[in-house]
Image: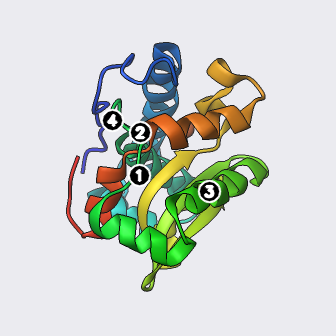
Amino acid sequence: MQFVLEPLPYSENALEPHLSAETLRLHHGKHHAGYVKKLEKLLRDEPQAKQSLEQIVKTSTGHVFDNAAQIWNHDFLWRSMSPDGGGEPRGELASAIARSFGSTDAFRKAFHEAAESHFGSGWAWLVLDGKELRITTTSDADLPLRHDQTALVTLDLWEHAYYVDYRNEKERYVSAFLEHLIHWDFAAANLAGLKRR
Ligand code: FE
């Protein structure tokens, strides 16, 4: 199959002032695009290239895994944010968050702590683990798919995700995500097992 750089689901400046057009241009157009190019190069003439991205993510190792997983993670990241994000979850998702964390405020506090304290490059996730919602972080390109968990929403913790806008102030980046960008409807659709962009 051809590996594609999925377009952003909104314009480059749509997440301003919380994430700048410059950040999205670099992050999507250079970093995310770079993983696509590298995977194409690694799998040129390999039988694996015929597999779906998800199959490759589930079964590969080394550089192939790193680049394939980073494509999956970034496709998921862009949909985890919205120009109309933030606010409160609704319906089934709100009930599930209340059951697992006590309240949405308690979820935000726990997600913030997990994201801020994660050491080095990686990702913060809200996942469905069995019947429970959980907050996890993964290192480098690792992702819930490799841990029998279903991802609901994610935040990129690599410095390239926030350094242009927030420099070393990672806590402000995480707060902006939780207050203004998190796309609850995307998380709710994933919880419901629906495919939605
Ligand atoms: Fe990234």
Residue at coordinates 20% horizontally, 64% vertically from top-left? 194
Look at the numbered disc 2 and say if its residue's Cβ is closer than 8 Å to ligand 1: no
Camera-near label (4 vs 3) is 3
Camera-near label (1 vs 2) is 1
How far separated are the C-alphas under marks 4 and 3?
A: 28 Å
Q: Is residue 164 above or below residue 32?
A: above
How far separated are the C-alphas under marks 1 and 2?
A: 10 Å
Q: Which residue is mark 1?
A: 72
Who comes first in sequence, dot 4 or dot 2?
Answer: 4
Q: Which residue is mark 2?
A: 36
SS at mark 3? helix
Look at the numbered disc 4 and say if its residue's Cβ is closer than 8 Å to ligand 1: no
Who comes first in sequence, dot 1 or dot 2?
Answer: 2
Camera-near label (3 vs 1) is 3
State the residue in front, 194 or 2: 194
Query: Alpha-carbon neighbours of circle 3 within 10 Å: few (<14), some, or many (≥20)?
Result: many
Please give left or right for residue 24 compared with residue 12 in the image. right
Q: Position of residue 154 (x, y in %)?
A: 49, 52
Query: Alpha-carbon neighbours of circle 2 within 10 Å: few (<14), some, or many (≥20)?
Result: many
Q: Which residue is mark 3?
A: 111
Would you say the residues marked 4 and 2 are in contact, meaning their CB atoms lie under 8 Å apart? yes
**Type of amino acid under label 2:** Val
Q: Position of residue 5 (x, y in %)?
A: 33, 35
Residue at coordinates 38% horizontally, 65% vertically from top-left? 94
Camera-near label (4 vs 2) is 4
Who comes first in sequence, dot 2 or dot 3?
Answer: 2
